[in-house]
Amino acid sequence: MLLRHTNKEIKPRKALTVNPAKTCQPIGAMYASLGIHNCLPHSHGSQGCCAYHRSALTRHFREPVMAATSSFTEGSSVFGGQANLVQAINTIFTTYEPDIIAVHTTCLSETIGDDVNQIAIKAVKDGKVPEGKHVIHASTPSYVGSHVTGFSNMTKAMAMYFSKSTGTPNGKFNIIPGYVEPSDMAEIKRLVKGMGITPILFPDTSNVLNGPMTGKYNMYPDGGVTAEELTATGDSIGTIALGATASADAARALDTRWKVPCQVQDLPIGLGATDRFIDALRKAAGVSVPDSITGERGQLLDIITDMHQYFYGKKVALAGDPDHLIPLVEFLLSIDMMPVHIVTGTPGKNFEKRIREMTDHLPYPVNVKAGGDLFQLHQWIKNEPVDLLMANTYGKYMAKDDDIPFVRMGFPILDRVGHSYFPTVCYKGGIRLLEKILDALLDRLDRDAPEESFELVL
Amino acid sequence: MSDTIKDTKTIKPGGVDTLDPEKIKKELLSRYPAKVARKRSNQIMVNKKDDTGKTPVMGANVRTVPGIITQRGCSYAGCKGVILGPTRDIVNITHGPIGCGFYSWLTRRNQTRTASDADDNYMPYCFSTDMQDEDIVFGGEKKLKAAVQEAYDIFKPKAISIFSTCPVGLIGDDVHAVASEMKEKLGINVFGFSCEGYKGVSQSAGHHIANNGIFKNVVGKDDSIKEADYKINLLGEYNIGGDGFEIDRILDDCGISVVSTYSGNSTYDQFANSHTADLNTVMCHRSINYVADMMEIKYGIPWIKINFIGGNSTAKSLRKIAEYFGEEALIQRVEAVIEAEMPEVERVRLAVKKRCEGKVAMIFVGGSRAHHYQDLFNEIGMRTISAGYEFAHRDDYEGRRVIPDIKIDADSRNIEELKIEKDDDKYRARKTDAEIAALKAKGFEFKDYKGMSIDMENDALLIDDISQYETEQLLKLYKPDLYCAGIKEKYAIQKSGIPMKQLHSYDSGGPYAGFKGAVNFYKEIDRLVNSKVWDYLEAPWQTNPELSAKYGWE
């Protein structure tokens, strides 16, 4: 057994996290920064933070992930990191020539109280920021929230730094996709464009972290939201934030500052949430939904009805980020699966409330926890076994030990490919999710079937 | 930064010799701000070996300039991730915000094998105090104490260790006080490491801190003597991809008994008993030489440098161990093992060499692997024309003879040097002075490492703490057939159309140590440098974009 020390007896824990279902803010900020065109993320802290975040993102995407660091030493930790950051800005603009440096903080620079805004102003004054180039920053202390919080903070920072209002609406629509895959961002853009709307999607890691092999390495790939687009967000006719945890803050900030009306929707995972997203977009932009999109919806529904017998009544345990889990649980419920244990590592009261609202009427008890960990989830599973586990790659240790069909979902996925190329959002993504769930369930059915009832046609 | 690297396959073997390394060095420095260029110029050296075996002075183990995209990590990574990570039965609690524990959770491919499920194995687990803002403001000691208690209540481990992350040192949490209090209370060994990420200039500081902590808190706690003829410790071997298993297999065949490995596939009890071995063999000099030195002074165990990377290197290392013990039975048994193992190594080596001869590699990893892996490349006729370490010190380039000349700077001064004295009860000279002298007279080297530079060609480029910018320039100028580094560098290199092998974690491969490891490595390099998958970079319409007047069926 891999997790041989995990047993049924649940003892109370107040201080010890075991097998986390989240990681820290700066990696989310780094990921968001990679979704800006010609931008180099910068980690204001010890070298290790930057090395760890780059490694984790690289393993997940199997793509180059470049970022610089302030390389704090003991001295800078005592005297402050201003000199390090000013020097870093100079080195980066000279050597790596980005248009934008996106600085995020770490627990180190936050604990000593470095004022990055003031340091950035000093760098400009000292002539370290070339004309037309930008240093943006977000405060991302690792001891608050999770990787999703960091993503949210950097997304808000990019909107607030660049956005302006000329007073003339530009007819575009802001879409904030949240902490999702490059494939998901591309899929959301495809649907929005398909409705005749011009989106400004930010951040946008499509064509950045799912780039082609060409034999030519480009530190700044073709993708990413541009500074011009971010500037124009203040003139957009509206903003839809997908996911309350990752995207709402940026949308609300644009609304407050430039009166760009915003609404916060769930991530479009599954039928219901995608319906709401498309419907909200249709109403807000005053367009009609083309038949092609209604057709995609019908295809998703077709699979649901065709394969309903395999979904019905199957118990599911889930771990992931709040913005993913809320619509995912809704989707599973809508196809008559039974989510029974649900954990996110990201703290926040709203998550448990939303899940409770969806599951309160169910005839079986549901375990739900925000700020929980995979150890807790595994103990729940030991007490009430499930037919399917959906989690990031760390879930496979539980799946192997307890022989549970397993679908990889979320961040990080370190042992399979596909997530950065094939979406799990919107109707097409729903089809892919169901395909993955069915593959896991039916492979198990085939594996365990006695020879006499091993079936050719399922 | 978007320059094209083309025609990598058309560079002829040996073509690199037409390049002037001094000019290349200038080129590598040309883009940097003046101050940065000055600093980097001390870390980029054109290799020159003089008659006395002296090589260029390398500006190693110095700070990375802020803003440089570096390979390096931090002290915590070196301490918790590298040295203590592979030990399976200690509950390692990371005291800090969640990230540090999360990123060092199962990401290094250290393998471990227990006899049964009854044995403790916490390696698939991640333990953290997940510090929150109130812990930063009011101090985290209370939470740490509670976390140690909870870990004990739930898991009942034989030992618990605590690893400090950056904020812990800044807010003044005393992890050592918490550790000793909980040790007293729980009756098991509890010990802490002050390995805050900002200490030192790289992972290397963390290695040293880990060495000190294990030596102080664990080594020497179990004096029972193992019944075996030839007892050694294997130091600086982390069982990445099963390397340690292969070395153990070979040593076992030779009748050599491993008391402890630091720290691949290791246990707490092995560390506690490791002072009873009769010889310390050092694989990764950088990460573990401190323990070797301290054990020699306190317990009288001599140490030698060995290398199990490469078929010949493995044979040589086995012979060296046999020579140390000096008994004919062992010497003959070692020869028999080498004789049994080498034919398969030779068969594969010669087959692969035909396809790899003359190709060039570059290696930028670690504190010893950039050196060790050159043996394997040599064995299949490949040259390493540029190499460097990520976190090594001058002695790893120039040899231990430069240690007295290494300047102590502000960063290295902060890493504790333990004052070690001879333990009058436990010290036991393993050899008489006469025996030692006799071995030395035969050319046997104790406590020595000659470094990497001496083993490299004149004019090879030695680059310490290479940056992303320099990497890209090297690829463009030299167009190597293979580049070896870590995961952060991997895909930028491959996007340039050049195959890349990770030599920290081996990608998904291994073992590469020992005889079977050499065979695995030859085959892996053959796969990488001779694969057709790198020939598909251009689509047909890109190689021949002109419209032809003819239709396909004409």
Image (spheres, rainbow, N blue to C red):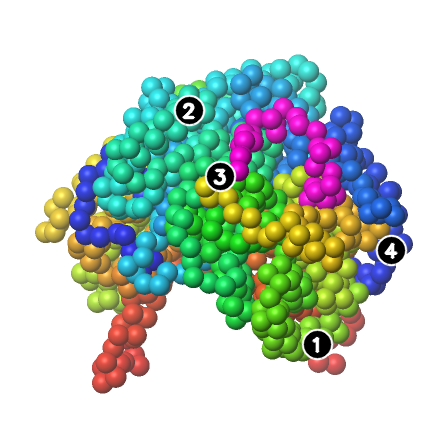
Q: Are marks 3 and 1 on the same chain?
A: yes
The total of numbered circles placed on residues is 4
Q: Is residue B406 magenta?
A: yes
The residue carrying pointer 2 sits among few (fewer than 14), some (14 to 19) or many (20 or more) residues within 10 Å by Cα, namely some
- Chain ID of residue with mark 4: B
Earlier sequence position, callout 3 versus callout 1: 1
- Chain ID of residue with mark 2: A
Mark 2–mark 3 CB contact (< 8 Å): no
Residue A85, relative to residue A308: is it above or below? above
Query: Three-letter amino acid code at disc 3?
Result: Asp
Residue B478, given in percent of the width and then of the height, sits at: 79, 52
The dot on residue B424 is 3
Image quarter of the N terminus of chain A: bottom left
Residue ID for mark 1 = B351
Q: SS of the residue at dot 2?
A: helix
Query: Three-letter amino acid code at disc 2?
Result: Ala
Q: Are marks 4 and 3 on the same chain?
A: yes
Earlier sequence position, callout 4 versus callout 3: 4
Look at the image and tell me whether residue B497 can be seen: no
Q: SS of the residue at dot 1?
A: helix
Q: Nearer the viewer, residue A169 or A426?
A: A426
Q: SS of the residue at dot 3?
A: loop
Residue ID for mark 2 = A253
Image quarter of the C terminus of chain A: bottom left
CA–CA distance in space, label 3 to label 1: 55 Å
Residue ID for mark 4 = B17
**Between tags 3 and 1, which lies in front?**
3
- In the rendered structure, the answer to whether residue A431 lies left or right of residue A170 reads left
Mark 3–mark 1 CB contact (< 8 Å): no
Q: Nearer the viewer, residue B131 or A161?
A: B131
- In the rendered structure, the answer to whether residue A44 lies left or right of residue B103 reads right
